[in-house]
Image (cartoon, helix red, strand yellow):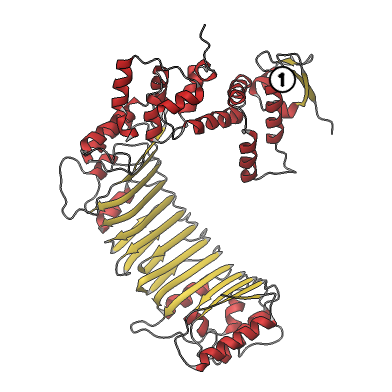
């Protein structure tokens, strides 16, 4: 049985041939397929090739067919390895998963970032993610006081 | 020119979604202090947990109550609240005001059992919960329920778990009537219930542990029941058990008089334990559980009044009556009943124990050692599919050499059946 292939084009001009059934895990791509505008390939202006490769890897793994069922435990282990990435890649994956509308990948990437926040002090959170502290000194003192109970 | 970090460039909606994965109240508090945008985004938190030691540094419970209230009220839509730290009933009432319609899961450490006197200041903690009408899961620790809680109705409540409670019959009855759609009920370490009739048409999983003298009376009417685990009852009636797959009845302190199940034809796993069960009750339940696959039996004595040893059980009849038995775990006194003088009387060549794969036998006394060895040998001989036999030897009561001889016999037996037998 031949499977229909479609072509995905990254923002930096690389093309990737992917099984349609795998690609339509992205709701965005699924709608384009429905609207029948994929003949010349699908340009993904917001997704760089480096990230598109990871997205395709994820979709292939999650394209489960009944002949090869995979246990939830094994999938969770695979997820962990898959997400062992640099912080900047994780953020780009979040944006790609959001743009391509792949809910399970979006949830996985957001959960990963949430796990990086857990257990940290505000200073640690800021330094991990390079967040700008835009409180005025008075505002900062007030908010610290209100949340002081968490730091004792 | 300042360049925003990737985190700071994330759209607000995505930041909020990430923060909604945080559950620990401490993490939420830390995020509030990171930046203005973060402080505004923590309102997306849907589930929050206050651990036991959250407020160790805070002297007044009123202060910790209001910290919890502030965090709850700043959430746009709180669905799950778990509080293991101490709180007052007026604190709880103020929290419920903010979340009563969105809350789906509530877990609270009530800690009411420790107090000697019932101090009524303002609303009772249990009553405050009544306003959370959309609750689906309720879990309470350390509950004192000596008067019916002011619960009108929880139409969506499917799971109720109470661990550590002191209650009376009418209060429990009233509480359960407010949860007609329960599919899971757990009452652990529950003291004070003498007699209870439970009528829950959607109940599938039920675990009841009645602490005390072990003579609670139970009637349970739930046609969809799939698993039932009861401890501490002397009299149990469950009229509809068409779908019951797993049944465990145990009695740590009292005596089990009567168990009345209409039919146990779907039963796959049965566990009966206790100090003393009436013989009729044991026979009745074994007779009904014909197709049981997994059987665990640990009862010390039988008898209707005084403690009595078990009468003889015929080996062949027993296994013919339970042809689907796959795993069999049997202790001391009940094993001894299978090893009486005439237990192996009916053994003949056509007899088999077809499905048995695993046997665990716990022996305590060397009495009737020869019969016990015969029974063990019969098990190995007639259970062709047997994969594993574990013999647990507890401290022998007698100091005779008979105890040593018995152990020797068992070791010899193990030696002859090395691929099957393990000794612990």
Q: Position of residue A85 (x, y in %)?
A: 62, 30
Provide the chain ID for the residue under circle 1. Answer: A
Q: Residue at x 44, y 52 (%)?
A: B203
In front of the other: A91 or B111:
A91
Residue A11, compared with residue B273, is above or below; it is above
Q: Is residue B324 left or right of residue B289?
A: right
- Tell me the quarter of the picture where residue A2 sits: top right
- Tell me the quarter of the picture where residue A96 sits: top right
Q: Position of residue B180 (x, y in %)?
A: 37, 47
In front of the other: B64 or B136:
B64
- Which quarter of the figure is the C terminus of chain A placed in? top left
Residue farthest along the top direction in this orientation: B1
- Which quarter of the figure is the N terminus of chain A placed in? top right
Q: Is residue B370 left or right of residue B160?
A: right
Q: Position of residue B200 (x, y in %)?
A: 40, 52
Q: Position of residue B253 (x, y in %)?
A: 34, 72
- Tell me the quarter of the picture where residue B231 sits: bottom left
Q: Is residue B235 left or right of residue B417?
A: left
Q: Residue at x 28, y 61 (%)?
A: B193
Q: Is residue B79 visible?
A: no
Find disc 1 in the rendering and name its residue. A49
Q: Residues within 10 Å of mark 1 (few under 14, many from 20)?
A: some
Mark 1: secondary structure: helix
* Number of marks present in the image shown: 1
In front of the other: B98 or B31:
B31
Q: Residue at x 38, y 59 (%)?
A: B208
Residue B129, compared with residue B310, is above or below; it is above
Q: Is residue B4 visible?
A: yes
Q: Is residue B79 left or right of residue A36?
A: left
């Amino acid at each position: 049985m031949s499977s229909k292939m479609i072509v995905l084009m990254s923002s930096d001009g690389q093309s990737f041939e992917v099984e349609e059934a795998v690609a339509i895990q992205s709701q965005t791509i699924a709608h384009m397929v429905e609207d029948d505008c994929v003949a010349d390939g699908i340009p993904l202006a917001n997704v760089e090739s480096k990230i598109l490769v990871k997205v395709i890897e994820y979709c292939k793994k999650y394209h489960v067919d009944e002949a090869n069922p995979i246990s939830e435990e094994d999938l969770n282990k695979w997820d962990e390895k898959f997400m062992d990435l640099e912080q900047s890649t994780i953020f780009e994956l979040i944006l790609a998963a959001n743009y391509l509308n792949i809910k399970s990948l979006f949830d996985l990437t957001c959960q990963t970032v949430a796990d990086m926040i857990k257990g940290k002090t505000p200073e640690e959170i800021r330094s991990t993610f390079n967040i700008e502290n835009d409180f005025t000194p008075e505002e900062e003192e007030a908010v610290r006081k209100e949340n002081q109970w968490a730091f004792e | 020119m300042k360049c925003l970090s990737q985190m700071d460039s994330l759209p607000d909606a995505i930041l909020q979604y990430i923060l909604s994965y945080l559950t620990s109240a401490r993490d939420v508090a830390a995020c509030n202090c990171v930046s203005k945008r973060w402080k505004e985004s923590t309102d997306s938190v849907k589930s929050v947990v206050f651990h036991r030691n959250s407020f160790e540094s805070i002297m007044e419970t009123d202060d910790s109550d209001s910290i919890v209230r502030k965090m709850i009220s700043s959430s746009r839509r709180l669905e799950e609240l778990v509080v293991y730290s101490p709180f007052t009933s007026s604190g709880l009432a103020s929290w419920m005001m903010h979340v009563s319609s969105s809350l789906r899961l509530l877990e609270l450490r009530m800690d009411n059992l420790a107090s000697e006197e019932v101090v009524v200041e303002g609303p009772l903690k249990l009553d405050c919960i009544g306003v959370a009408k959309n609750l689906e899961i309720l879990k309470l620790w350390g509950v004192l329920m000596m008067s019916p809680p002011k619960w009108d109705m929880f139409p969506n409540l499917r799971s109720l778990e109470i661990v550590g409670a002191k209650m009376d019959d009418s209060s429990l009855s009233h509480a359960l009537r407010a949860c007609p759609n329960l599919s899971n009920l757990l009452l652990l370490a529950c003291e004070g219930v003498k007699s209870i009739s439970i009528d829950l048409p959607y109940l599938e999983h039920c675990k009841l542990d009645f602490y005390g003298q072990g003579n609670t009376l139970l009637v349970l009417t739930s046609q969809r029941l799939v698993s039932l685990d009861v401890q501490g009852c002397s009299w149990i009636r469950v009229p509809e058990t068409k779908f019951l797959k797993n049944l465990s009845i145990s009695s740590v302190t009292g005596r089990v008089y009567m168990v009345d199940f209409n039919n146990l034809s779907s039963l796959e796993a049965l566990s009966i334990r206790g100090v003393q069960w009436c013989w009729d009750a044991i026979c009745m339940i074994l007779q009904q559980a014909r197709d049981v696959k997994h059987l665990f039996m640990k009862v010390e004595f039988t008898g209707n009044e005084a403690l009595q040893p078990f009468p003889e059980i015929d080996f062949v009849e027993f296994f013919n009556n339970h042809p689907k038995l796959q795993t069999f775990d049997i202790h001391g006194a009940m094993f001894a009943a299978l090893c009486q003088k005439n237990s192996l009387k009916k053994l003949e060549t056509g007899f088999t124990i077809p499905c048995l794969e695993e046997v665990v036998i716990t022996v305590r006394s060397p009495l009737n050692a020869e019969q016990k060895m015969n029974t063990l040998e019969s098990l190995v001989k007639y259970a062709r599919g047997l994969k594993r036999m574990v013999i647990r030897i507890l401290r022998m009561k007698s100091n005779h050499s008979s105890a040593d001889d018995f152990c020797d016999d068992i070791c010899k037996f193990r030696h002859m059946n090395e691929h099957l037998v393990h000794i612990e």
